Image (tube, helix red, strand yellow):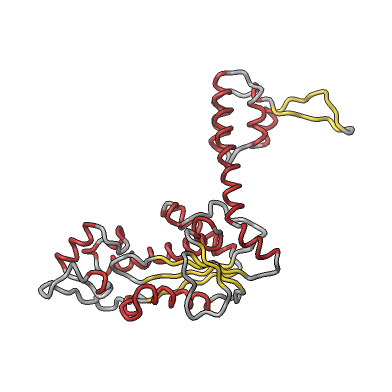
């Protein structure tokens, strides 16, 4: 709210508290259109405006009051959700355990493309607004939150296990390989790992805690899920540029009906996972070569 708007809204009252004159916002001095613009142009909920509307008897003002009340309720619920997501990191910090890294992956289920893992060490003294399971965020919101994570995290790293490594070690082994790589890339060595799922990472001697649906319950795991998802989506867009017949920019390598039909029609590419698509191809299915100059190294 601008200075001029606040001058219009305020009404001096003849009250004093500890020798100071108090003033209160008076929305009756504003038109409903002006109030509507204030609400539209204000990020979040202006508590002062909300409280002032409580005393405005106009029907339109009452409607605005209920709108702000619902928004305020949502803000309180979101604040509680966010604080709950940081509980594990805060409890470990209170016990002197840290740094704590959250780990998650993206791309275990697709028919094509690498598996990507991320590791994130978050500060516990400040929260990242909107942090959530990557699957619950829109692509635009994921990109925005990923940038915020990279700006605020104490350390973060992203690593890839290739299609060749998926074929060699199976998808679970390749996922652990990508996670181990991400841990080694962290600029701040972690003393505790929080891992999404119910399986500890093989070949790591750092104490670990697993958490089923951790990307929806734990802040550092959620942050890792967002970075892994955003990074892998970007890789699949690059794959689409090399193999536009398969719609990788839309399906991100997952087995949609259209994608399966494209595999049968055009044959597999070098970034398709042979073990995953064995039931879709035959000896007569054509194979697509890698375009000259194409590299998928993250």
Q: In this orientation, does residue 181 appear?
A: no
Q: Quadrant of residue 121?
A: bottom right
Residue shown at 60%/47% (left/top)?
Answer: 79
Q: Position of residue 174 (x, y in %)?
A: 39, 76
Q: Position of residue 4 (x, y in %)?
A: 67, 33
Vertical comparison of 45 with 186: above or below: above
Q: Residue furthest right?
A: 19
Q: Relative to residue 268, is residue 295 drawn left or right?
A: right
Quarter in which the N terminus is drawn:
top right
Q: Relative to residue 74, is residue 139 drawn left or right?
A: left
Q: In this orientation, does residue 170 appear?
A: yes
Vertical comparison of 167 with 276: above or below: below
Quarter in which the C terminus is drawn:
bottom left
Instruction: Count the marks.
Output: 0
Q: Position of residue 148 (x, y in %)?
A: 54, 59
Q: Nearer the viewer, residue 223 or 84?
A: 84
Q: Nearer the viewer, residue 31 or 133?
A: 133
Residue shown at 79%/24% (left/top)?
Answer: 13
Q: Nearer the viewer, residue 28 or 160?
A: 160
Q: Residue furthest left?
A: 284
Q: Quadrant of residue 51?
A: top right
Vertical comparison of 202 with 228: above or below: below
Q: Position of residue 105 (x, y in %)?
A: 44, 67
């Amino acid at each position: 709210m601008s200075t001029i708007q606040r001058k219009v809204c305020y009404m001096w009252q003849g009250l004093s508290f500890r020798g100071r004159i108090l003033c209160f916002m008076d929305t009756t001095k504003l038109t409903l259109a002006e109030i509507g613009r204030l609400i539209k142009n204000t990020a979040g909920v202006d508590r002062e405006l909300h409280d002032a509307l409580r005393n405005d008897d106009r029907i339109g003002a009452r409607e605005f009051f209920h709108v702000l009340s619902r928004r305020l309720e949502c803000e309180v619920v979101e604040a509680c959700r966010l604080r709950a997501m940081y509980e594990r990191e805060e409890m470990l910090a209170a016990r002197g355990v840290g740094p704590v890294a959250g780990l998650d992956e993206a791309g275990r289920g697709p028919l094509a493309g690498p598996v990507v893992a991320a590791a994130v060490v978050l500060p516990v003294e400040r929260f990242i607004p909107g942090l959530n399971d990557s699957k619950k965020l829109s692509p635009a919101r994921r990109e925005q939150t990923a940038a915020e994570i990279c700006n605020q995290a104490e350390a973060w790293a992203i690593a890839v296990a290739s299609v060749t490594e998926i074929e060699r070690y199976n998808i679970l082994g390749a996922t652990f390989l990508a996670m181990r790589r991400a841990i080694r890339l962290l600029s701040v060595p972690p003393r505790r790992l929080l891992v999404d799922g119910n399986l500890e990472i093989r070949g790591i001697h750092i104490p670990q805690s697993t958490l089923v649906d951790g990307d929806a319950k734990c802040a550092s795991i959620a942050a890792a899920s967002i970075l892994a998802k955003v990074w892998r989506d970007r890789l699949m867009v690059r794959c689409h540029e090399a193999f536009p017949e398969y719609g990788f920019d839309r399906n991100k390598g997952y087995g949609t009906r259209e994608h399966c039909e494209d595999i049968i029609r055009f044959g597999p590419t070098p970034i398709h996972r042979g073990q995953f698509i064995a039931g879709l191809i035959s000896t007569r299915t054509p194979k697509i070569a890698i375009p000259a100059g194409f590299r998928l190294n993250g």
